[in-house]
């Protein structure tokens, strides 16, 4: 996997680049739709490619490991072959889901034991095991097994957790580097910077991660409830330490404004369930602002969902029709809204990239942050 | 609206024709996907046209009247403008839904009073009212307001109901013929033959309907629980009486085998919720037979969903992947299965048409009936 830095914005720390994987290129900054169980909820693969213009999607190790399971995925020849998505895939480590299980999981140095939310069966995720699982899933980009600390978090807990995350990272690297891909193409590990909202821990973690010299790096443990100002502070601090010639992935972020602000701080890659989850609840992100489509005021508004994008949803359907579909609890409501929100997110990072390449990002960003944060 | 009879099969009573509406042509025999609330469940309008190759869809008067309501539909300029489907639309009369409401509805000569399933509000559907409603919805083909008798049904009830249905038909025609379309294009009324499974009533009704000389005719009250043999007997009896130069629409039918058998008896148009409803439960119709995709035996079957069709679902997804989506209760499961089943139904009537035009229908039909009825 190679990363070419194509441009740096003069007025901010924003960058434009090109990441090349065995399944094709990714132009950064990029947003990666979340495909939890091997499917981006309510959006087909053809539509993801042709309408949303997604360049890479995520899979969730925890979910895929439990269902369909690794035997099925391996028999298919990996996740790309299984779900028919032939562009790049990134898998998380499963850590985030496992830690969210609360009472049913136990963290030890060896790894985490947990019970399946599906059938209550008991499992162990260890750094080595999770590398093997991601090998079998067949993602192009594999995430290290880390502990994502909750927020707020005691300093001592954050420090001890961080030390363990670093020890786990070493184990992840040792395992991945001593095993081969199963499907004949390269799989690249991204380490994850943790440290909660403590500047000294974040600095220490970023330096540790930078030293490992992997092909890309990630920032975890943000967007977990902390104020946005703290998220930006930590992201900037970490980006300033991570090597500039490697892509930087801020995990689980965020709103359209969050994404633009973090691009300005030097982040290249994002993922978040927000566009799809909110779509299913009738919240639409548009270039004009945020719409709650279930609101009565849209009942006879026959204008396009987004006046600017000219996307699938806006070409074929009106606000009034989409509102009706939500009122009638029709499946098509989720389909249209999900496609629209994802298309908007990809449009937004594409616009950011265009402005970075043109040298106009710093001037463009503040107005766009305001515009996309407005409630219509 | 014009109907051109293009071919008659020598060995059966099957016909191929072309119905021309203000929103374009329909090649018969045809299957019409059901779009209850202005949307064919889980399938977008672009996909309906480009992938399913639907030529006409249905809307349900009862559902559309209650939600989004006629004011919204009229403000949009009719259902075509509202839902973005620019090809022909047929609306049922709402009678079938209203009669299904059971205890909350009352049938009188004037019409039927009922309570909304959404908010309990009280409404009256009369022949005149239902014509006005369908004018406002803006369907190309409008169905007469009739009583669809349940099965089994007492002879006396069926006879009295039929007489009322005929009186109602006269009132429907009088109202439609004395009003103008609201959106500048022609709207055509199809009368409905009733009479339960009583041959003399069916004959009487078919003769009455034939005498009215409308541009197309329908057969209602079948596929409501009676044995298939009785359905075919009634359909044949009625088709033999209805004018050959007008299209014949058998309402609410049916399985792939039902459709082929009724085409052989002279039916030109069909609608049914079966392909979409069963799709959402994991039952797939294919050219090889019927698949319950939730069955464990498909877990590692990576072959296309349908080996013959080469449709959207079969091109992009495997049986194993679709099974996984059902297991994980993903929305994409319903989307893929619905698109597949509808594409199969349209493929099936297209194949029937091709064989009628080629003079090979009678020889082709029995094998295909067997093939599509097989459980895989």
Image (tube, coloured by chain):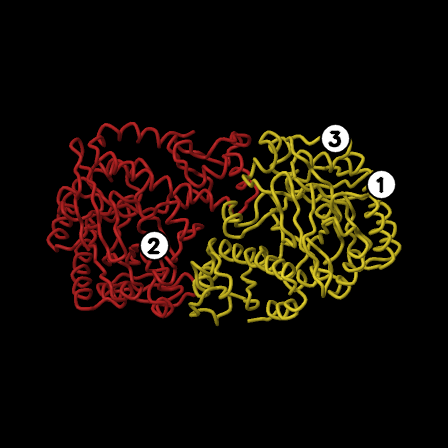
Chain colours: A yellow, B red
For the residues marked 1 and 2, what is the alpha-carbon distance in whole angstroms? Answer: 63 Å
In the picture, measured across the screen, residue B270 lies left or right of residue A94, that is left
Q: In the rendered view of the protein, which quadrant contains the N terminus of chain B?
A: bottom left
x 52%, y 37%: residue: B323
Name the residue carrying label 3. Answer: A179
Neighbor class of circle 1 (other Cα within 10 Å; few <14, some 14-19, many 20+) is few
- Count of marks, rendered view: 3
Name the residue carrying label 2. Answer: B100
Q: Which mark is residue A109?
A: 1
Are circles 3 and 1 on residues that touch, CB within 8 Å? no
Q: In the rendered view of the protein, which quadrant contains the C terminus of chain B?
A: top left
Q: Position of residue B207 (x, y in %)?
A: 12, 49
Closest to the camera, between mark 3 and mark 2, is: 3
Q: Secondary structure at mark 3?
A: loop
x 62%, y 38%: residue: A67
Location of residue A68 (image quadrant): top right
Q: Earlier in the sequence, mark 3 or mark 1?
A: 1
Q: Position of residue A367 (x, y in %)?
A: 63, 71
Are circles 1 and 2 on residues that touch, CB within 8 Å? no
In the picture, measured across the screen, residue A10 lies left or right of residue B247, that is right
For the residues marked 3 and 2, what is the alpha-carbon distance in whole angstroms? Answer: 63 Å
Q: Chain of mark 2?
A: B
Q: Secondary structure at mark 1?
A: loop
In the picture, measured across the screen, residue B89 lies left or right of residue A42, that is left
């Amino acid at each position: 996997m190679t990363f070419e830095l194509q441009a740096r914005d003069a007025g901010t720390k924003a960058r434009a680049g090109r990441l090349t994987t065995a399944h094709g290129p990714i132009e950064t900054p990029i947003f990666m739709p979340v495909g939890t169980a091997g499917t981006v909820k309510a959006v087909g693969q053809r539509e993801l490619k042709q309408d949303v213009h997604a360049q890479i999607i995520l899979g969730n190790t925890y979910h895929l490991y439990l269902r369909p399971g690794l035997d099925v995925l391996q028999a298919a020849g990996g996740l790309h072959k299984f779900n028919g998505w032939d562009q790049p895939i990134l898998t998380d480590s499963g850590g985030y889901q496992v830690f969210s299980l609360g009472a049913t999981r136990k963290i030890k140095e060896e790894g985490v034991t947990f019970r399946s939310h599906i059938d209550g069966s008991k499992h162990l995720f260890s750094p080595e095991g999770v590398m093997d699982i991601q090998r079998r899933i067949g993602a192009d980009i594999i995430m290290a097994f880390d502990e994502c600390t909750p927020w707020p978090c005691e300093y001592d807990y954050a420090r001890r957790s961080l030390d363990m995350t670093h020890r786990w990272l070493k184990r992840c690297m040792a395992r991945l580097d001593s095993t081969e891909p199963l499907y004949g193409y390269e799989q690249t590990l991204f380490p994850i910077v943790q440290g909660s909202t403590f500047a000294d821990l974040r600095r220490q973690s970023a330096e540790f991660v930078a030293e490992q010299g992997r092909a890309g790096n990630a920032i975890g443990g943000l967007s977990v409830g902390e104020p946005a100002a703290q998220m930006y502070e930590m992201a900037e601090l970490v980006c300033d330490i991570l090597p500039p010639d490697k892509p930087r992935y801020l995990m689980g972020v965020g709103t359209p404004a969050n994404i633009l602000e973090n691009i300005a701080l030097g982040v290249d890659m994002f993922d978040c369930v927000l566009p799809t989850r909110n779509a299913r609840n009738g919240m639409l992100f548009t270039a004009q602002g945020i719409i709650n489509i279930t609101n009565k005021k849209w009942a006879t508004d026959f204008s396009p969902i987004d006046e600017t994008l000219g996307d699938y949803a806006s070409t074929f359907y009106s606000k009034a029709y989409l509102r009706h579909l939500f009122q009638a609890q029709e499946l098509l409501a989720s389909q249209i809204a999900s496609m629209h929100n994802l298309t908007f997110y990809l449009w937004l990072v594409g616009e950011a990239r265009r402005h970075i390449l043109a040298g106009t990002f710093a001037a463009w960003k503040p107005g766009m942050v305001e515009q996309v944060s407005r409630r219509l």
